[in-house]
Image (cartoon, grey):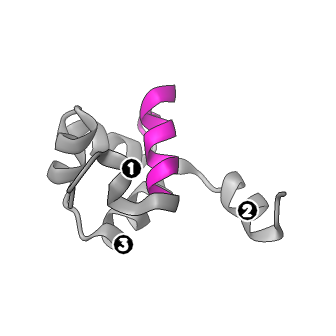
Amino acid sequence: MLTKETERKDSEPIGPRIKVLRAKLGMTQSRLAELMGVSFVTVSRWENGASVPSPAALATILKAEIDGSAAFGPAQT
């Protein structure tokens, strides 16, 4: 069931959401990039809106918004 919060969040651009997620998890762009299997430049481009994550990367990011660092695999911080 969608709530007003879910609807609002789903309409936000992904770049700022990634930046907020990183801050919440205490991760640098480099650490998130390492966990995602991309370069830190790619994470920077996502955050700045210069590019968007692939569908697989987006799914992991969305999962991390819910599950935290557990979305990246066991014992990831």
Residue at the image point whose x is 30% and y is 43% from the top = 43
Observer able to see residue 16: no
User: Mark 3 belongs to which amino acid?
Assistant: Lys
Question: Where does the magenta region start and end?
Answer: 50-65
Query: Outermost residue toward the front?
Result: 74
Q: Position of residue 73 (x, y in %)?
A: 29, 45
Distance from disc 3 to disc 1, alpha carbons, whole Å, reads 14 Å
25 sits left or right of 58 in the view: left
Q: Does residue 29 belong to the magenta stretch?
A: no
Percent across and percent down for residue 29 are 22, 53
Quickly name the residue at label 1: 71
Q: Quadrant of residue 54?
A: top left
Residue in view at x 51 percent, y 38 percent: 59
Q: Quadrant of residue 40?
A: top left
Secondary structure under the numbered disc 1 in the rendered image = helix
How far apart, in angstroms, are the residues tagged by discs 2 and 3?
Answer: 18 Å
Q: Nearer the viewer, mark 2 or mark 1?
A: 1
Image location (x, y in percent) of residue 62: 52, 49
Q: Circle 2 is placed at which residue position?
A: 6
- In the rendered structure, are the residues bearing label 3 and label 1 in contact, judged by CB atoms less than 8 Å apart? no
Screen quadrant of the C terminus: bottom left
Q: Secondary structure at mark 2?
A: helix
* N-term-proximal mark, 3 vs 1: 3
Residue in front for this viewpoint, 44 or 4: 4
| Marks 2 and 3, the one that precedes in the sequence | 2
> Do labels 2 and 3 touch, CB within 8 Å?
no
Q: Is residue 38 above or below residue 33?
A: above
Nearest the camera: 51 or 54? 54
- For marks 2 and 1, the one nearer the N-term is 2
Q: Is residue 3 above or below residue 32?
A: below
Query: Of the residues shown, which amino acid type is indicated by label 1?
Result: Ala
Q: Residues within 10 Å of mark 2 (few under 14, many from 20)?
A: few
